């Protein structure tokens, strides 16, 4: 499968439909990689330990209607070691999950952290999920631990337990911080969230410096540079393993374009470059797959809608929070892509805000290829052959993004890390 796009690359939540079948047993049998596939079981016990599925004697997994996207079927197959036996035209598949990765969520009791924890708990690639927060995380862990999916959930409360929450972790995701309220920009969160990110990344540097780090805490345009500077001061910076999660912009772009043009959502892919705030979010609507025709008015309308989508949610919630659910969904998608890459999948692409040489800016969001060691390649093709509107928007976003990056770096230089 060749996937050179920012599409969902995930595995764990494909739709399942149960039917009946006859028992079977005998020779090894390979499942073909078609769009949908049927799995038959001669005992309901084979399913009871897998991802909370109810016992059934037959399962059909339809990739096109799956929760996480078109690649779900293939990724689901690749996330398990199937043992198959064939007899009398029926096949028994015994799932042996290779759940081997340990994930930590820092800020797990918050508005993003809780739904994100639930979605990550559903991944067949996660063996252990560490939930950390300064308070209220024990109840979240108790609740989540009742979900009958394979991963173990452990809670850690307060700064004294932060190092233990990070021991042996493969991926750290940081949604910690205060949410936006009506009238606030992401940059208004800087003074509070900058210190939170700095302290948490220091702990990551000390305890699990080789882990992938996913930064969600806003303003991402500044908090990622802050994290980079902290890691540099600690002597453990690996730019290939530090990511700003801009996946919400991709998810929104795909959704809005599909709705606007009455397209099948699963087929739509819109690369989004730049940063993760206001005009720094640049959806490249000329690069939509499948190719669609948009008027100049539609391009401008969609661009503004995508850029302001987060603010729309903040205003709609009227002070009760920010875009927590869509953010959690997008972060779970990026998490699953990272886990697939760590698991050896050589065909994983996502958009992310990373250290980059695509432009004169030191950090820039674009499509990247993910591998076992993090970013394997930054994909330059999306910035080639831009429309006049996109080229002007790209130049217009650079000063604001540059200022946000410099603000993060300046903050880090004034706040030396603990030895």
Image: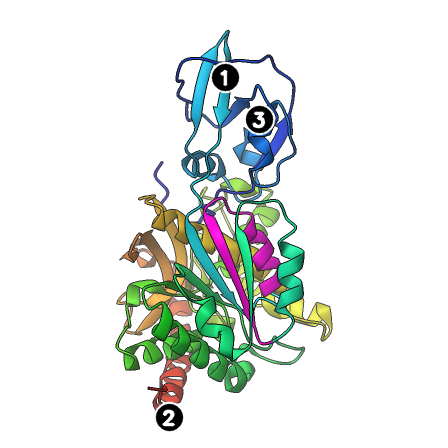
Q: Is residue 267 visible?
A: yes
Badge 1 local density, few (<14 within 10 Å), some, or many (20+)?
A: many
Q: Which residues are magenta?
A: 113-134
Q: Secondary structure at mark 2?
A: helix
Q: Residue at x 44, y 13 (%)?
A: 26
**In the image, residue 79 lies in the stretch drawn in magenta:** no
What residue did someone put label 3 on? 60
Answer yes or no: do the residues labelled 2 and 3 have beta carbons within 8 Å? no
Nearer to the camera, 102 or 365: 102
- Disc 2 and disc 3: Cα gap in Å? 57 Å
Q: Circle 1 is placed at which residue position? A: 91
Q: Is residue 407 left or right of residue 333?
A: left
Say if the magenta span includes residue 123: yes
Q: Is residue 413 above or below residue 338?
A: below
Is residue 81 shown above or below 386?
A: above
Screen quadrant of the C terminus:
bottom left
> Who's the residue at 40% across and 13% down the image?
27
x, y percent for residue 181: 66, 77
Nearer the camera: disc 1 or disc 2: 1
Q: Which label was assigned to residue 414?
A: 2
Whether residue 252 appears in this view of the structure is no
Please tell me whether mark 1 or mark 3 is closer to you in this view: 1
Q: Tag 2 or tag 1, which sits nearer the N-term?
A: 1
* Circle 3 SS class: strand
């Amino acid at each position: 499968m060749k996937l050179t796009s920012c599409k969902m690359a995930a595995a764990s939540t494909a739709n399942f439909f149960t039917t009946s079948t006859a028992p079977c047993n005998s020779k090894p049998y390979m499942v073909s990689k078609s769009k949908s596939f049927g799995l038959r079981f001669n005992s309901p016990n084979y399913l009871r330990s897998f991802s909370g599925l109810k016992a059934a004697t037959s399962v059909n997994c339809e990739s096109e209607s799956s929760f996480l996207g078109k690649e779900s079927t293939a990724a689901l197959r690749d996330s398990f070691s199937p043992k198959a036996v064939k007899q009398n035209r029926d096949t028994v598949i015994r799932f042996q999950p290779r759940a081997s990765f340990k994930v930590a969520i820092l800020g797990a009791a918050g508005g993003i952290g809780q739904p994100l924890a639930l979605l990550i708990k559903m991944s067949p690639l996660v063996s252990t999920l560490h939930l950390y927060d300064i308070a209220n995380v024990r109840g979240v862990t108790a609740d989540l631990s009742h979900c009958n999916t394979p991963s173990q959930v452990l809670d850690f409360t307060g700064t004294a337990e932060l190092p233990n929450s990070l021991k042996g972790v493969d991926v750290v995701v940081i949604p910690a911080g205060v949410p936006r309220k009506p009238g606030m920009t992401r940059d208004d969160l800087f003074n509070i969230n900058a210190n939170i990110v700095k302290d948490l990344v220091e702990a990551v540097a000390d305890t699990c410096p080789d882990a992938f780090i996913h930064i969600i805490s806003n303003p991402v345009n500044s908090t990622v540079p802050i994290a980079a500077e902290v890691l540099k001061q600690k002597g453990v910076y690996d730019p290939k393993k530090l990511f700003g999660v801009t996946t919400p912009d991709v998810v929104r772009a795909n959704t809005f374009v599909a709705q606007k043009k009455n397209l099948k959502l699963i087929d739509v892919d819109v690369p989004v470059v730049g940063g993760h705030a206001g005009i720094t979010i640049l959806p490249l609507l000329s690069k939509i797959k499948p190719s669609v025709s948009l008027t100049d008015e539609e391009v401008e309308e969609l661009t503004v809608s995508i850029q302001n989508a987060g603010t729309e949610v903040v205003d709609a919630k009227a002070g009760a929070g920010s875009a927590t659910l869509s953010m959690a969904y997008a972060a779970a998608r990026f998490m699953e892509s990272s886990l697939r890459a760590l698991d050896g999948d050589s065909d994983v692409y996502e958009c992310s805000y990373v250290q980059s040489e695509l432009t004169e800016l030191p950090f820039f969001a674009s499509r990247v290829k993910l591998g076992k060691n993090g970013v394997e390649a930054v994909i330059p093709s999306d910035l080639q052959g831009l429309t006049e509107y996109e080229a002007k928007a790209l130049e217009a976003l650079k000063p604001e993004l540059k200022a946000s990056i410099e603000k993060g770096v300046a903050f880090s230089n004034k706040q030396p890390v603990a030895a």
